[in-house]
Amino acid sequence: MFPSRVSVVAAFVWLAVLSPAAGQELEATGWFRLDQVDGRDVFVTPEGRPYLALGVNHIGALERIENNAFQTEYGGNWDRFRPSLLKQLRGWNMTSLGYGGPPTLHAHLPYFASIAPVHNEKHRSHPVPGRRDSYEFPDVFDPEWARAVDQRIAEETARHRDNRLLIGYFWTDTPTWDLVKTRALRGTEWVSEIRALPDGAPGKRRYAAFLAERYAGKLAELNGIYGLALDDLDELAGADLTRIAVGRHRVREDDEAFLAVIAEQYFSVVGRSQRKHDPNHLVLGERYLAGDHPEAVLRAAAPYIDAVSVQPGDRYTRLYPPSTEYPDVEIEALHAATGKPVMICDHAVSYPTPAEPRTIFEQAESERAAAAVTEAFVRAAMRRTYVVGYLRCQYVDRPASYGRGLRQGLLREDGEPRRLLTEVYTRLFGEWTSRLKRGD
């Protein structure tokens, strides 16, 4: 069941109890930061204690589920529910609220905030006028876009920048960057969208300048590859550049090079805006879907982030590694390309039930099998000295949109815990923090 009522636990008592290696003091800056302890990357609390971010996301979804115990027993009141929730999370050896929690809990638990500078998430639909869930590949070279993003970041950070319990910010969730995989998913990608902009658009001008520089002195070669009949490279700005075979070897090389230009522009705008509006909190960057993070994109992001984040799996397509396997190659690539610690920001292994045969994230055959696979995954993460935390996806069951079945939580909709899964997290999170205390 949902946790029973207990006495209130103050926010910084919570931090003192849950900070691993509580006796080991590091520099106290008043904000969360990153450091190393015995060769292991860790967060450091505002008070200067090593800390692993272990928690569960989307707790705020409770208020969107009707007739559950949160509504019936607690009247949908977070202040009344908070003491019980704190006791439950501590019982699972969780140290963080994750992201997607209600703002009222941000004064009581370490947490993460989310800002989406661009809406190109995997779960978004094809663009339909008036639909807020449509994906976009904006013209990041347009000053108007930069101004809009700066305003959005200013508004979002204003709610969090003075809060010492904020660990840091995530940006866009599972962004689509990889050209081949995004074309398979969308039928288009960021370079093609820039290429199709009207004449005079800042992005179209930047793309034309890129091609002109790349093919300087090679006009005939450009015409042959792109199916053009230009007399001069200066004509590129007004040419139709969309009639090409995007799969041609040379075009793909050009597209990957221009994707790096897009990424450099994008992260320079977003990263500088983020630091301007909140210079004190950590930036954990985009929440990359494992398998969709080209190296050039990671290199462009690296100067503006403190750690790199990854969501392993979610049953989008077979193009990506499943959540049932620790994606060692992909996560190592994130670390190697950026030189940053890695945060596993959203992960789950689900299983079908008679009532809900379809669930998000990859499925094991039963809860017992899901618990075993989850244990193997978390243990693999624990062995990597650059992994600084793990957030489970979903606190409580709730429907998933677009026919995807169920977002399966650690609690069933009636509040009953999934015993085998919660036991795994309790044991492993306790072991992980104990290892940090011992310096293993």
Image (cartoon, rainbow, N blue to C red):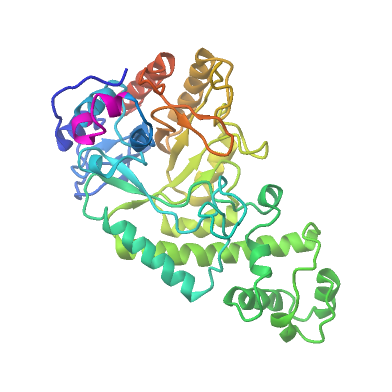
Classify the position of the N terminus by image quarter: top left
Magenta highlight range: 69-81
- Location of residue 437 with respect to 277 vertically, above or below: above
| Residue 75 visible to an observer of this rendering | yes
From the viewer's side, name the closer residue of 45 and 197.
197
Tell me: 248 left or right of 337.
right
Image quarter where the C terminus lies is top left
Please tell me which residue lies in front, 302 or 279. 279
Q: Is residue 365 above or below residue 139?
A: above
Q: Residue 71 colored magenta?
A: yes
Q: Seen in the image, is 122 located left or right of residue 183?
A: left
Q: Is residue 292 above or below residue 431?
A: below
Q: Is residue 418 magenta?
A: no
Q: Residue at x 52, y 24 (%)?
A: 350
Q: Position of residue 180 (x, y in %)?
A: 70, 51
**Residue 371: percent from the left, percent from the top?**
48, 17
Work out whether residue 398 or residue 429 is closer to the camera in this orientation and state it: 398
Estimate the x, y position of residue 207 in percent, counting from the top left.
Answer: 65, 73
Closer to the camera in the image, 20 or 189? 189
Asked if 197 appears above or below 175 in the picture, the reply is below
Residue 158: quarter of image:
bottom left
Residue 237 position by quadrant: bottom right
Q: Position of residue 214 (x, y in %)?
A: 71, 74
- Left or right of residue 255, residue 116 in this image: left
Residue located at (54% from left, 21% from top): 351
Our reading of the magenta stretch's main secondary structure is helix
Q: How many circles with numbers are drawn on the protein?
A: 0
The residue positioned 21% from the left and 45% from the top of the image is 46
**Residue 23, can we see it?**
no
In the image, 221: left or right of 358?
right
Q: Quadrant of residue 14?
A: top left
